[in-house]
Amino acid sequence: MAEDAPKSRMRGPARKALITAAALKLFASKGYHATSLAEIAAEAGAARTVMYDHFPSKRVLLLSVMQEQNAALVEYVGARITASGPPEDRMRSTIDAYFGFAQSKPAARRLLFDRTDEDDPEIRTVRQGIRESRTHAVAALLGTDMRAVGVLPGEPIAEAVVELIITGLDGAAQWWERNPETSRSSLVEGAMRLLWTGLGHAR
């Protein structure tokens, strides 16, 4: 009981942060259906009844965590896209930022990109909405660079290009999880050779 006393006096935002962190860890490792609210409560050190003060259901908790982590990813990478400096330097920084996100927040990356096995129609719809919002956001951030290569940000092909970049980088991040001996700098330079130099111009 003594150990629980400090937690009972924890403020709402701090308690909510513990719950979302626990949910992220378990949803990413076990999936939505295999994770129970009781497990999340135990991981967070919270009573299950307290969880309902913040999230009315497990579905709402999952959707909240996905939206939170997606916003964090877009903000983290977007700051590099719009930074000052030559386009090549910004691209290298952006690629490095994504791999940095994947390295420092592996659970978030898995939840956003790997966990697509939910059979709940609402979850599928929201997940697709999150993916589309991420694509729109990155396409807008890349607007100036896209115009420089003749692609208008409002064109459908612009979003297709962004999807290609995002899924390509995440595929490399998944490969990196299986081959952790590869350095992050090597991965960044390899991606730069393809995305900046291009296969057609590689020597």
Image: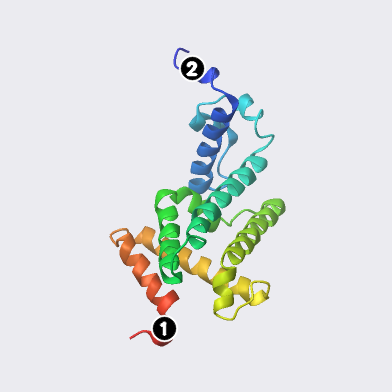
Residue, disc 1: 199
Q: For mark 2, give the secondary structure.
A: helix
Q: Considering depth in this image, is 33 or 178 the residue closer to the camera?
A: 178
Q: Considering depth in this image, is 69 or 154 the residue closer to the camera?
A: 154
Q: Earlier in the sequence, mark 1 or mark 2?
A: 2
The amino acid at mark 2 is: Pro
Q: Considering depth in this image, is 164 or 114 the residue closer to the camera?
A: 164
Residue, disc 2: 6
Residue drawn at point x = 68 percent, y = 37 percent? 57
Disc 1 packing (10 Å; few <14; some 14–19; many ≥20): few
Name of the residue lying farthest toward the top: 2
Residue 160 screen position, x and y as percent: 60, 73
Residue 179 screen position, x and y as percent: 33, 61
Q: For mark 1, give the secondary structure.
A: helix
Q: Are marks 1 and 2 in contact (CB under 8 Å)?
A: no
Q: Is residue 45 above or below residue 135?
A: above
When asked about the image quadrant of residue 38, the answer is: top right
Q: CA distance from mark 1 to mark 2?
A: 58 Å
Residue 181 screen position, x and y as percent: 28, 59
